[in-house]
Amino acid sequence: MLATAGALVLAGCGGSDNVSNDIPVGVTQHSVTTYSATAVGTGTTPATQDLLTGGLGKTGLGAAVAPTYADPANPTALELRRNALHSNYRAILDPTVNGGYGSLYGPNINAAGTVTASEGLIPGREYVATLDDGSGRKRVTMAVQIPDSFDQANPCVILGPSSGSRGVYGAIGTAGEWGLKRGCAVALTDAGKGVGLYDLTDDSVNKIDGTRATRTAAGALSHFAANITDAARTAYNAMFPNRLALKQVHSQLNPEKDWGSDTLVAGRYALYALNDRYGNASNPAPFNAGNTIVIAGSASNGGAAALRAAEQDGSGLIDGVVASEPVAQMPTATGYGITVGGTAVNGYGKTLVDYVTYANLYQPCAALAAGAAMTEVSTFNFMVAAAMTTRAQARCAGLAAKGLVTGSDVAAQSADALAKLRAFGWSAEHDQMHNAHWGLGNGPILSAMYPVAYGRLSVLDNVCSTSFAQVSATGDVVAVNPLVKAQSFALANGTANGTPATPVYNNSVGGAKAWQFAVSPSTGAADFGLDNALCQRALATGADPVTGAALTASSTPTAAQAAAVKAGVAEVTLNGNLRGKPTIIVSGRSDALVPVNNNSRAYAAFNRVVEGASTRLRYIEVTNAQHFDTFLPFGGFDTRFVPLHQYFNQSMDLMYAHLKSGAALPASQVVHTTPRGGTPLAAPAITAANVPAISAAPAAANQIGFSGTSITVPN
């Protein structure tokens, strides 16, 4: 803990005159609001909102359509909060009844796992603050939620850094729901990401409360504005009108390097808030790390933030960690190994920017391979559209012409592309997922975002001739829809996923186009912007992916840009030392976005090398589970996959029991699940039999172990 965090100094000194409750250094508190809803309401006033559901309850969160705004062009902060809770909760899990909502998980399931008739509203207080580094540009948002059910005799805090690039409520469906039901305080944070949508046209920003204003009017409440002058902005707008900047991409701060420390500050702020809520003159700081259970638990990027926080926690704030499908950035692929079913894995331990830019090159071609065919008609099955298939075929042809795949026809070229992905860390479980991930645009989106973020490159740089904008149905840049912009705090997820920002390739033949429509200058074909993908790959490797030649001062991208990306990646890799903290990592074997060979398996093996046999890390791998539970309602996903969210909740239960009563953590293991099967889009309702519990004593055939420096994962 920081020595300046007065709430944590002289822990356990009770009513000593020397104890004070001081807000952590760099933190500015903006509001303390009581949300007292006990019955579902409209959510338009503080009295009708609650901490978890925004006043919507289990029924409202389960509704596909979010509540309307009184004035859609000028939503209030309270309306935006309500709808942000709705969208962020639904983004992390399958919200359908047949998928398990309301029976396996949801606001109506109590802490004991019992299905109730309750709407699950949780009244309490919410403290909102920001953390800055003195520059006025960092602006990490934190929301500490203290339920009225908080048990002062058994205090607990759950740290919930947001998943993905989401805003402050990004972990409401994971850490938020679990902790609030348990009566714990929950410290949510965007960890320097969030919906920082900056419109270069009118110099407008999202404020901390989600409403919008010009940069000048927002002042210290501005969540993010690009660090550029008005003159530079005017000149840029003349060349590239109607463009947008995103906080995680364009802050030039490489926020990922601070995910761990930001999460720790959120924890210290949570203790401050608890002491503010319950302290008194004789005992101003009754809660501290010594008498309060603190668990860091979140998913995806939030899971990575939890691991980073544990590695950086030199003061003993965190007692335990639960990381679901974490983006575990590995510092090396040497010194440890992975075997699956007795066979050594060759491709593993790569960083996000490495495997994302690699996938962006090969996935659209690989998705055409017979082994990758996704026969179901799904929202994300891009091969359903003939035009997309034609462009994927053009990508195969372009790769072949540049010597990046072999084969004289699409069948051979796509098979080679799929084989390359297999050798890079993906496995057979992922073959049919490449289609879906490309259809969603993960490759183009993440390849456009992360190299720029790591390199601290400016929005003015148009790195790899790529910018961000709202686009029309034909991929043309348009002015951002004012309603979408006004509601972005609740609609957007901090990425360029089209609400409203989309990656735009400025160098597309005939004029700037969204990635789906781009025509590459070198091929003259509509091939999803092969030239841009090659440039982004070069940023990740420092070399031309076609010739293998090192980048230079005059190449595109430049050697300096690639060096900056490399330096930024070095800032975000993990060190494998969890400081002896009990930790559970749970991941889906079928996760094609964050493949386990490059993340969870690799981290578990590396941690064993770093901490040795004394490590308290447990690794749970779930079959038939993938990265996005929110995909599960779609045809083919409903029949083939089970919710990983169920296992996050189980892992949190196990960790709490371990910390509270000393219950043993389970051994590392593979959990074999049973998909629902049936007809796509009409899979039968899930039951507990589909998702068996993590075993306290797994059979030997299911145990994950170690042989020398290699993790051994059974089939």
Image (cartoon, helix red, strand yellow):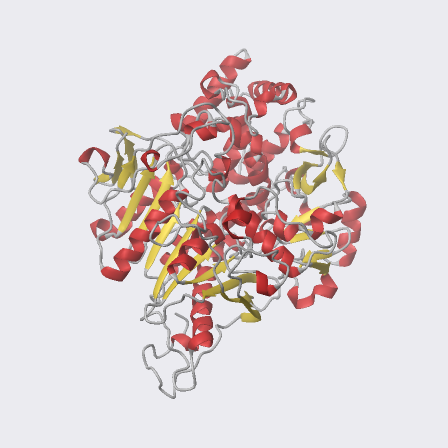
Q: At x 59% / y 35%, what residue is drawn? A: 444
Above or below, comparing residue 413 to residue 180 in the picture: above
Who is closer to the viewer here, 350 or 497? Answer: 497
Residue 667 appears at what percent x and percent y? Answer: 23, 45
Q: Position of residue 102 (x, y in %)?
A: 44, 44
Q: Position of residue 383 (x, y in %)?
A: 57, 22
Q: Is residue 628 visible in this depiction of the protein?
A: no
Q: Nearer the viewer, residue 579 or 709?
A: 579
Q: Is residue 459 left or right of residue 150?
A: right
Residue nearest the viewer, comparing 48 with 147? 48
| Residue 470: image location, x then y, percent | 71, 41
Q: Is residue 558 positioned above or below 9 on the image?
A: above
Quadrant of residue 54 within the rendered picture: bottom right
Instruction: Quadrant for the N terminus, please.
Output: bottom left
- Eyeballing the image, is 104 above or below 50? above
Viewer-proximal residue among 594 and 90: 90
Quadrant in which the C terminus is drawn = top left
Residue furthest out toward the bottom: 17
Which quadrant would residue 701 be assigned to in this image? top left
Residue 205: quadrant of the picture: bottom right
